[in-house]
Image: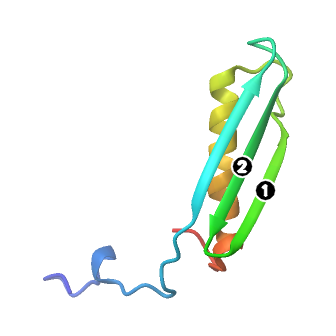
Amino acid sequence: MSPSGATTLLETPPETPLVEVTAYVDGAVNPNPGRGGWGVFLSSGTREKRLSGTVPEERTTNQRAEIHAAIRAYSAQGALSGARALR
């Protein structure tokens, strides 16, 4: 506990045990810039999840497609690991 009596973030016990989730992401555009797509593969223990889609922008870049994939992976990892919320 801090001197003021407040609990700091580092002192707060986790509500659920940590679960390791591995994410592989990719994004591509053809031509660059142009229409883009993304793909995600998540794994945790024996559970796996695959996601894919198009980038919502009409003209995007390869870098934006890659970032979009990473964001989607981060958003989906809670469902795979069974976590109630992402921290």
Number of callouts: 2
- The earlier-in-sequence mark between 2 and 1 is 2
Vertical order, 28 against 14 (above or below): above
Q: Viewer-proximal residue, 73 or 21?
A: 21
Q: Are marks 2 and 1 in contact (CB under 8 Å)?
A: yes
Q: Residues within 10 Å of mark 1 (few under 14, many from 20)?
A: few
Decide: is 36 above or below 10.
above
Dot 2, how many residues are within 10 Å of its Cα: few (below 14), some (14-19), or many (20+)? Answer: many
Q: Residue at x 49, y 88 (%)?
A: 15
Outermost front residue: 46
Q: Is residue 15 above or below residue 19?
A: below
User: Real-space Cα distance between discs 2 and 1?
Assistant: 6 Å
41 versus 37 height, above or below: below
The image shows residue 82 at horizontal and vertical percentages of 66, 80
Residue sitting nearer the eye, 72 or 80: 80
| Amino acid type indicated by mark 2 | Val
State left or right for residue 25 relative to residue 30: left
Which residue occupies 52% across, 70% down? Answer: 20
Q: What x and y, as percent, mark residue 39?
A: 76, 43
Q: Which mark is residue 27?
A: none
Q: Which residue is mark 1?
A: 50
Please, what secondary structure does the residue beneath circle 2 have? strand
Label drawn at residue 40: 2
| Type of amino acid at the residue the image marks with label 1 | Arg
Residue 61 figure quarter? top right
- Horizontal arrangement in the rendering, residue 22 relative to residue 53 (left or right): left
> What secondary structure is found at the residue carrying circle 1?
strand
Q: Residue at 75% of width from left, 13% of height from top?
A: 33
Image coordinates for residue 81, horizontal then vertical, percent:
63, 75
Q: How is the image coloured?
A: rainbow
**Quarter of the rendering containing residue 11:** bottom left
